[in-house]
Structure formats: structure tokens, C-alpha cells
Image (cartoon, helix red, strand yellow):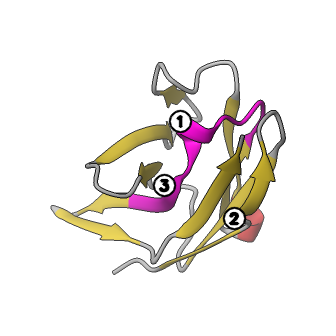
Amino acid sequence: QVQFVESGGGLVQAGGSLRLSCVVSRSTFNIDVAWHRQAPGKQRDFVAAIYTGGATNYADSVKGRFTISRDNAKSTVYLQMNSLTPEDTAVYYCQTLLRGTYYRGQGTQVTVSS
């Protein structure tokens, strides 16, 4: 079983930056972790992922603006978000798939004002 605690969300003006943190209840060394987001009235969308080998993947909408990273010593995954736009407003979740089960945190709200 895996638990996540996300933090770092808040209200920011367009063009600003935020760094989200996701503390994981187990070692992040050997699991893939992804960030997803869900805006009001919309489906949950993939944002970025970091894999056990260190490779990363991003949604086209955030490439060049967001950076996912992890600190295995702290069992924490980060999402650095720059050049934010109102379209980035959503609840951001950490997620992983482990032994056929999806685990997701409670999310952290990001609101970008124009």
C-alpha cells in the first residue's frame, strides 16, 4: 500500500511559479510516480511522470514549463511549475500503480489568476 501527501498549492498570478511536493509513504526509489490534475467539470489529466530509472514524461501542455523530480532520501516527488496560466488551475494529485492497484493522494489546489 502507498500513501501520498501533496502540498505546495495556492493562489498565484499568471506567469508565476509554484513548487508542489508529494511525500510518499514508501521509498520512491523503485516506484513510478505521476502527477495528474483535475479542473472543475473536467476529467483528470496526466501532467508528468518520473520512472524508476529516472526518465521523465510530460503532457504536451506543460512541456518546457513544468519539471518533475524526486528526492529518494526524502521519499518526495516534486513538480516545479513555471509560467503558469489560468488553464493550469486544477487540483493536482500524486498517483502510482502498484501491483495492479492505483493509489492517489488527496490533492492540492492550484489556482492561477489572470
Q: What residue would you read off at disc 2?
A: 9
Q: Looking at the picture, how far across and down is residue 67, in whole percent?
A: 69, 34
Which of the labelled discs sits on residue 112, or is there none? none
Q: Is residue 64 magenta?
A: no
Q: CA distance from mark 2 to mark 3?
A: 26 Å
Regarding mark 2 in the picture, which secondary structure is present there?
Answer: loop
Is residue 77 or residue 75 the one in the foreground? 77
Regarding mark 3 in the picture, which secondary structure is present there?
Answer: loop
Q: Is residue 81 left or right of residue 99?
A: right
* Tag 2: amino acid: Gly
* Tag 1: amino acid: Gly
Q: Residue at x 68, y 49 (%)?
A: 112
Q: Mark 1–mark 2 contact, CB under 8 Å? A: no
Q: What residue would you read off at disc 3?
A: 30
> Which sits earlier in the primary sequence, circle 1 or circle 2?
2
Q: Is residue 85 magenta?
A: yes
Q: CA distance from mark 1 to mark 2?
A: 27 Å
Q: Residue at x 50, y 70 (%)?
A: 107
